[in-house]
């Protein structure tokens, strides 16, 4: 086991490389992306405390994605044997592993929805609603999500400029605002209605069956 620091933009590991280590993020943020037909498709952002590079624990020999530092990061690197020993001995790590597996399933669902949802507003609104459903429920219809445009872009497989433009449109319409790396949703009910209307609009554009 050892620690390493990486500068912003550094690649921790790349898709297709042999994998023999597991990582835990101690500080910073890391983006995960998968290359398909010469294009990188981001699908998640991990932060301090998260585990990544789990492929060897599942018996895989090659990396299934690329991990890029979104900021200066510090990671702890474990051999496969060290990872298994630590996970077996630490119930908190076992819980983190279960959470990570759940996140991977959610990411797969996101990618399926992104393939179906053609317009950027639908993708963004759906991702925000999914994230809102995972936070502690509030007594009011408002909620705050710790999510940046870059993280949102990774979830919806769109470039950051498109996501920022969509957020500005939603902000101008009074649905939400972006402040200090957090999305402030003014009314979840209104945002859900908007998502429904965007779906109706898409059906009309495509033509009814």
Image: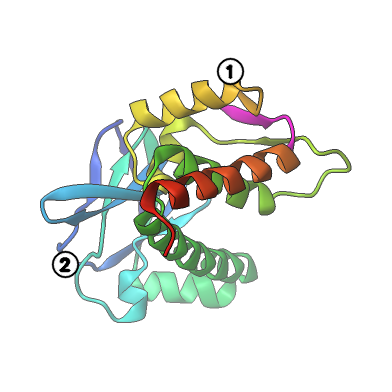
Residue placed most toward the observer, 92 or 191: 191
Q: Main secondary structure of the magenta part?
A: strand
User: Image check: 44 left or right of 95?
Assistant: left
Residue at image position (68%, 53%) is: 133
Residue at image position (57%, 71%) is: 94
Give the secondary structure at mark 1: helix
- For label 2, count other residues whose C-alpha is less than 10 Å away and answer few (under 14), some (14-19) or many (20+): some
Dividing the picture into quarters, in which one does residue 56 lie? bottom left
Quadrant location of the N terminus in the rendered image: bottom left
The nearer-to-camera label among 1 and 2 is 1
Is 134 situated above or below 27? below
Q: How many marks?
A: 2
- Where residue 99 appears, as percent x and y from the top left, is 56, 65
- Where residue 209 appears, as percent x and y from the top left, is 41, 65
- Where residue 170 appears, as percent x and y from the top left, is 56, 27
Residue at image position (49%, 54%) is: 50
State yes or no: residue 56 in magenta. no
Give the secondary structure at mark 2: loop
Q: State the residue position of label 2.
A: 18
Q: CA separation, marks 1 and 2?
A: 47 Å
Dividing the picture into quarters, in which one does residue 144 lie? top right
Q: State the residue position of label 1.
A: 172
Residue at image position (34%, 46%) is: 157
State yes or no: residue 186 in magenta. yes
- Where residue 207 appears, as percent x and y from the top left, is 39, 54
- Residue that lies at the very extreme toward the left in this rendered image: 38
Part of the protein shown in magenta? 178-187
Residue placed most toward the observer, 162 or 208: 208
Residue placed most toward the observer, 125 or 66: 125
């Amino acid at each position: 086991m050892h620690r390493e620091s990486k500068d912003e933009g550094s690649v921790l590991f790349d898709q297709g490389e042999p994998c023999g280590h597991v990582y835990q993020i101690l500080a910073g943020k890391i983006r995960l992306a998968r290359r398909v037909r010469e294009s990188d498709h981001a699908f998640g952002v991990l932060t301090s405390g998260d585990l990544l590079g789990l492929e060897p624990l599942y018996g895989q020999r090659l990396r299934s994605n690329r991990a890029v530092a979104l900021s200066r990061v510090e990671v702890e690197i474990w051999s496969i044997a060290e990872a298994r020993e630590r996970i077996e001995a630490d119930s908190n790590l076992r819980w983190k592993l279960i959470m990570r597996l759940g996140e991977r399933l959610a990411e797969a669902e996101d990618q399926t929805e992104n393939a179906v949802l053609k317009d950027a507003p639908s993708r963004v609104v759906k991702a925000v609603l999914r994230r809102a459903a995972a936070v502690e429920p509030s007594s009011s219809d408002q909620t705050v999500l710790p999510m940046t445009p870059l993280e949102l872009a990774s979830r919806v497989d769109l470039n950051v400029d498109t996501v920022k433009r969509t957020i500005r449109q939603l902000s101008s319409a009074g649905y939400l605002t972006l402040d200090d790396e957090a999305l402030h949703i003014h009314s979840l009910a209104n945002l859900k209605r908007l998502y429904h209307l965007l779906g109706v609009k898409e059906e009309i554009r495509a033509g009814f069956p």
